[in-house]
Amino acid sequence: MTQRARTILIVAVVAVVVIVAGVVAITFTSSGDDPDSASATTVAAQLGKVTVTGEPLPQGEAPDDPDVGAKVPTISGVDYTGKPVSIEPGTDGPMMIVVMAHWCPHCNAEVPKLVEWQQSGKVPAGLQVVGISTAVRDNAPNYPPGSWITDTMKWPWPVIADDEEQTAAIAVGTTGYPFVMFVDAKGSLMFRVAAELSIAVIQQLADQAAAT
């Protein structure tokens, strides 16, 4: 079976799982269009500086994502301590990217499962995992996001602090939160969806990405 055939098969399997379970996610909205978005002066310390190299991906997700196989852009930014963090598809090997928002209840359900998965030792060797923390709201739960991701969630992987325009989230075509995405070793999109996924499904996708 070819790599493309294996990818199509696993996407089909995951799509069925997502449809049966129900897609549990909050629809993506840009901060600028959100009436509940935080004021720039209040959230300035929780925003990063983001640079995108390459063409941002249009919005999309499984099961009918037309951009599977497309080149994923490079995203450079910083974490909440100011440390540089980069997503460099095709350079850092296969990747899992997780887009999340501190106030999103589905993110608060999904992220602890991912942390437990990391602690279990079952994350495939060579799979890079990076988070994008986005859509900051100072009038929403779990603010500030820097404390949420580090102290509350205890996220063990690098995380990019998105900017006010949600540049990083937009660059990967985010449609909702949480948004889970897999990229192969050549830097091409394999799978993405806005949903809470079971760890069994995450494991399937991670193993598939790690095999590229």
Image (spheres, rainbow, N blue to C red):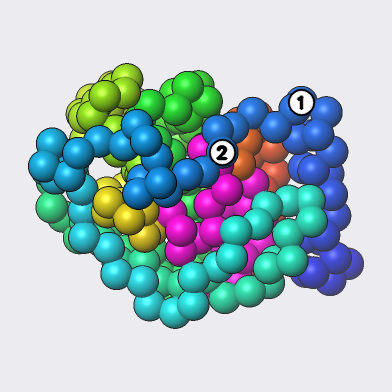
The label on residue 27 is: 2
Which quadrant is home to the N terminus?
A: bottom right
- Tag 1: amino acid: Ala
The residue singled out by tag 1 in the image is 21
Report, in whole angstroms, how far the alpha carbon at label 2 lies from the one at label 1: 17 Å
Residue 136, x across and y down, in percent: 30, 38
Q: Give the left or right position of residue 49, taking residue 97 as reference.
A: left
The residue sitting at 65% across, 57% down in the picture is 60
Side of 3 where 80 appears, left or right: left
Q: Residue at x 84, y 49 (%)?
A: 12
Quick one: label 1, few (<14), some, or many (20+) residues within 10 Å? few
Return the residue nearer the eye: 41 or 58: 41
What residue lies at 49% left-to-right and 77% top-to-bottom? 55
Q: Position of residue 110 (x, y in %)?
A: 52, 28
Residue 207 appearing in the image? no
Q: Is 78 drawn above or below residue 135 in the view shown?
A: below
Magenta residues, start to end? 169-193
Q: Is residue 99 magenta?
A: no
Magenta-colored stretch includes residue 182: yes
